[in-house]
Amino acid sequence: MKFYSLNNQNIKVSFKDAVIAGIAPDKGLYFPESITPLPSDFFENIEELSNQEIAFQAIHQFVNEDIPDEALKEIIANTLDFDFPVVDIEESVATLELFHGPTMAFKDVGARFMANCLGNFSQGEKQDVTVLVATSGDTGGAVANGFLGVDGVKVVILYPSGKVSEIQEKQLTTLGQNIEAMEVDGVFDDCQRMVKTAFLDSEITDHKKLTSANSINVARWLPQLFYFLFAYKQSKSKGKEIIFSVPSGNFGNICAGMVAQKLGMPVKHFVASTNVNDVVPKFMKNGIYEPMASIATISNAMDVGDPSNFVRIRHLHQDNLETLQQHLSSYSFTDEATKATMKEVYSKTGYVMDPHGAVGYLGLKEYQKNHSNAYGIFLETAHPVKFLDVVEDTLGLSPEIPPQILKVMDQEKKSHQIASYEELKQYLLKN
C-alpha cells in the first residue's frame, strides 16, 4: 500500500518511507491510499481473538509490503504487553484505561509500535535516523521510553518549559543514552512550529535523516486504532449502541478510532471532548476552521490551538461537514467544569480520573443527554498520578505512585534550554 500527501495526492510513498520522512515534502500529512474493511466475521467472532491477533489483522493491509508477517507479529508482541481494561463507572458509562503501559499514557502504544518499526527498518542502514518530536506532555515520555536504546535512532524531544507536569518532565529528561530533551521558552505550538521548520530546512535535512514521532507520523497514529477494537471486543456483549468519547488535543487518537470505524467496527459515533482550546467544537458548529493561540489548562496534553490531525478526519469524511457531523460531535469544557466532574465522580463512585479523562467523561455525558440508549466509553488517557498536583488540589488525596513512575522521580533532570529555532538548528547540525 502507498501513502499519499493530503496536500497533493500525486506524492505517493511506501509505509517505510512515510515513517522515515514523517511528513511529506509539501508539508502534507501522509494518508493511506485505501482502507479496506475487515471481513464481517472478524467482528462477529472478535471475542475469540487475542489482542495481538486483532492488532495483526487490523494493521496488516497498511504495512505488509514493508514488514514481513513474522516481523510484524514480533513488533506487535513488543508493543502490546500490557492490559487495556474497560471499567464500568456507572449505568451505561465506562472508561477504557490506557495507562497500564510503561509510561502510563495512551501514547505508549503508538510510540512503541513506531520505535519497533524504525528499529526494523534501520537494520543494515548506514545513516542514523534522528527522531524530532514536540510534546505537550505525554508524547515525550512515551517516545523517550519507546525509543530508548534502539540502535540507529537518536531522539530529540522539544517541550514547553513549565507547561508539563513534573512527572511528565522527569519521564523525558532523565533517561539519557540516545534521548535528548530540549526545554523551550514558549508553548507547545512553538515547539511544534520549530519541529515542522526543521523538517523543511535543507541545511539540516541534507546532512541528517529526520523523522517525527508525533501523531503526524503514520506509525505513531495508525496503531492507536488497536485499543478501540479491544474496547469493542470487551463491550460488544452489552447489546447497546457503543460510542467513544475521546479527550482530544492534536486529534490523532480519535482519528485512529475513526479508521477502526472505516475498517468495519460497528461504532457509529465519536465525541471529541476538548478543553477551552475549542477550534474543532467551533468548526463543527459553523464550518469555519480558525486556529488559535493555545491556552494553558489543567489538561495540558490537550492545549493545542491548531490540531494537526483534524485534516485527516476531514479527509476521512470527504471534507463534507454534514457527513462529518453524522459521525462526530465535539464539545469544550472549562477547568472549573473539569474539576467539578473529578469531584463528583469520585464522591459517587470512588473512581479517580485524571483531568483529561474527566474532559472525556464530560463530553460523553453531554452527548448522552440526547442519546440516552448509548453505552458510552470515555478514554482515560493517562494515570491520575501523572497530574498529581491537580488530583491532590481537586480531590484532596494522593494516589499511590506506581513503580514505573517512582523509578524516574529521583533521577536528575537534564535538558537543553532554547528560545529560538536557530538554537535548535545549531544543536542538530553539531550533534
Image: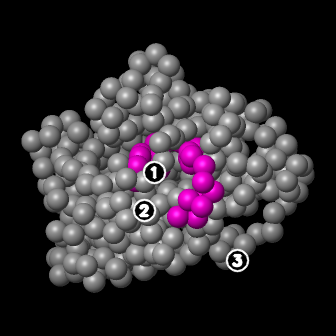
Residue 155 image-quadrant placement: bottom left
What amino acid type is highlighted by mark number 3? Pro
Q: Secondary structure at mark 2?
A: helix
| Residue with the mark numbered 2 | 43
What amino acid type is highlighted by mark number 1? Pro
Placement of 204 over or under 279, stated as above or below = below
Is the image coloured rainbow, by chain, by secondary structure, or in one colour?
one colour
Q: Nearer the viewer, mark 3 or mark 1?
A: 1
| Residue with the mark numbered 3 | 403
| Residue occupying the point 37% across, 29% down | 323
Measured from the top left, where is residue 163 in percent x and y? 61, 45
In the image, which residues are magenta?
A: 233-261
Give the alpha-carbon distance from disc 2 to disc 1, as whole Å. Answer: 8 Å
Based on the picture, tell me whether residue 235 belongs to the magenta stretch: yes
Q: Horizontally, is 283 left or right of 204 in the view?
A: right
Placement of 317 over or under 45, stated as above or below = above
| Residue with the mark numbered 1 | 266
Measured from the top left, where is residue 145 in percent x and y? 50, 71
| Residue occupying the point 53% across, 32% down | 329
